[in-house]
Image (spheres, grey):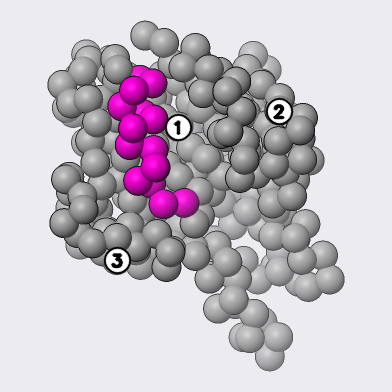
Amino acid sequence: MLATVLAPISRRLVYPRGETRIPVEDTTYDVTVRGAQLRGWVLNPGREHALVYFGGNGEALGWLRPELERRFPDHTSYLVAYRGYGASSGKPSQRALTADAFALVDHAAHRHPEAPVDVLGRSLGSGVAVQVAAHRPIERLVLVTPFDSLAATAGDLFPRLPVRHLVKDRWDSAAIAPEVTADVLVLRAGRDALVRPARTDALLRVLRPDTHVVDFPDAGHSDLSEDPAYWKAIEDFLQP
């Protein structure tokens, strides 16, 4: 009975997409993947390098348009909402989002054959990004406040409930991290109350030993990007 009651709650916590929804006409780019229209924006089109962004579980992407356009002028940036988020159609799940991510990165690679694709994933998007990097020839991978698994992260947040066992979409990044061959940058928030630092540390233990780590000891989960050093670290790492 408890599992029946809590399962829908856990799904809403994993994919709280309601506040990200925007009108279709506010977007300028779409791609069809497995019956869904994934919509967003392509910034600085026609560059040799491509950057694909995978956002957090409740992150609206519009604020990133001027940031990516200005900070990565040598990249064409693909800022496309997950299915069910933004102006994209469909319903999110780990299986669907992973398949969509593969298709989007393949799409970017086809449009930019001169250089491997770079990927940036934040929070939930770190789980998506690790899946991609484990199965696609990614050159550089940026992980912002990443976790070892979403199930373990949920267990930290609700220690008195069996949430860890009820989360259907587990996003177990640690299990496939050894398959990642890309150069990796991890941005770690020392006061992250959502993805606890221990979850990021657990992932770091199974990523390649030369992973670059930039610590923000006073930053939380949501305000990390407000530190000027945040964008500087990513810009330096993705410099062509």
Q: Quadrant of residue 18?
A: bottom left
Query: Circle 2 sits in a helix, a strand or a loop, which is it?
Result: strand
Query: CA separation, marks 2 and 1?
Result: 18 Å
Provide residue 14's location: percent of width, then percent of height: 55, 62
Query: Which quadrant is the N terminus positioned in?
Result: bottom right
Q: Nearer the viewer, mark 2 or mark 1?
A: 2
At label 1, counting other C-alpha atoms closer than 10 Å, the crowd grade (few under 14, some 14-19, many 20 or more) is many
Provide residue 55's location: percent of width, then percent of height: 45, 45
Q: Which residues are magenta?
A: 59-72
The label number, if any, that marks residue 90 in the structure image: 3
Residue type, mark 2 in image: Phe
Where is mark 1, residue-wise? Answer: 120
Where is mark 2, residue-wise? Answer: 216
Query: CA separation, marks 3 and 1?
Result: 23 Å
Query: Circle 3 sits in a helix, a strand or a loop, which is it?
Result: loop
Provide residue 23's location: percent of width, then percent of height: 23, 62
